[in-house]
Structures are given as structure tokens and as C-alpha cells.
Image (cartoon, rainbow, N blue to C red):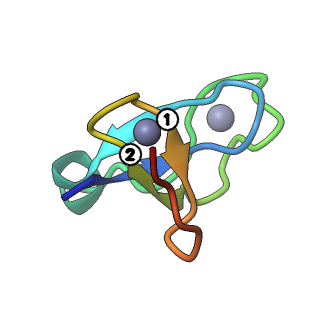
């Protein structure tokens, strides 16, 4: 099963794991990022190719 991750959709493209998100890293803190201060968005990370995609999207090979 693909891993749940959270990403910044701004210019910094930060990505945090479920554990990091649960420990309080829930929004972008990168200075200068276009989405600084905004909450990360949930994604799934493909265990095969490493690509991230939205939970409602299907990703297959
Ligand atoms: Zn950011
Ligand atoms: Zn993939």
C-alpha cells in the first residue's frame, strides 16, 4: 500500500511523512515559499516510482 504523505503545493515542494505531520509539522515554514504558512495537502506516495498523487486519484503502472 502506498504511503500517506503531506506536501506543500507552493514553490518549496516540501514533503513530510504521516509521522511528522502527526507530530505537529502541518504547514509550510519555508521563508519565501508561495504557500508559506499554509497547511500541507494530503497525498499518496507511490512505493514503486516515488510519484505523489491526490488521494482521490488512481495511480497505477
Ligand atoms: Zn512551501
Ligand atoms: Zn508509481
Task: Name the outermost residue toward the bottom.
Answer: 56
Q: In the image, is the residue at mark 2 within 8 Å of ligand 2 by its beta carbon?
A: no
How far apart marks 2 and 1 lie (CA) works out to: 6 Å
Left or right: 42, with 17 as reference point: right
Residue 8: where, in percent of width, then height?
61, 43
Indicate the quadrant where residue 36 lies.
Answer: top right
Crowding at mark 2 (Cα within 10 Å: few <14, some 14-19, many 20+)? many
Q: Give the answer, above or below, for where 26 lies relative to 58.
A: above
The residue drawn where x is 75% and y is 38% is 10
Q: Please name the residue that numbered disc 1 is placed on.
A: 51
Q: Please name the residue that numbered disc 2 is placed on.
A: 45
Task: Name the outermost residue toward the front.
Answer: 61
Q: Give the answer, above or below, for where 30 lies relative to 60.
A: above
In which quadrant of the rendered image does the C terminus lie?
Answer: top left
The residue drawn where x is 55% and y is 35% is 29
Q: In the image, is the residue at mark 1 within 8 Å of ligand 2 by its beta carbon?
A: yes
Indicate the quadrant where residue 30 lies.
Answer: top right
- Image quadrant of ligand 1 equals top right
Q: Give the answer, above or below, for where 23 lies relative to 10.
A: below
Q: Give the answer, above or below, for where 12 lies relative to 48.
A: above
Q: Secondary structure at mark 2?
A: strand
Q: Secondary structure at mark 1?
A: loop
Residue 26: where, in percent of width, then height?
42, 56
Number of numbered discs present? 2
Left or right: 32, with 15 as reference point: right
Cβ atoms under marks 2 and 1 closer than 8 Å: yes
The residue drawn where x is 48% and y is 57% is 43
User: Residue 22 got which mark?
Assistant: none
Amino acid at each position: 500500500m502506498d504511503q500517506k504523505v503531506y506536501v506543500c503545493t507552493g514553490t518549496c515542494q516540501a514533503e513530510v511523512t504521516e509521522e511528522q505531520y502527526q507530530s505537529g509539522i502541518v504547514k509550510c515554514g519555508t521563508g519565501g515559499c508561495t504557500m508559506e504558512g499554509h497547511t500541507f495537502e494530503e497525498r499518496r506516495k507511490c512505493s514503486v516510482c516515488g510519484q505523489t498523487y491526490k488521494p482521490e486519484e488512481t495511480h497505477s503502472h
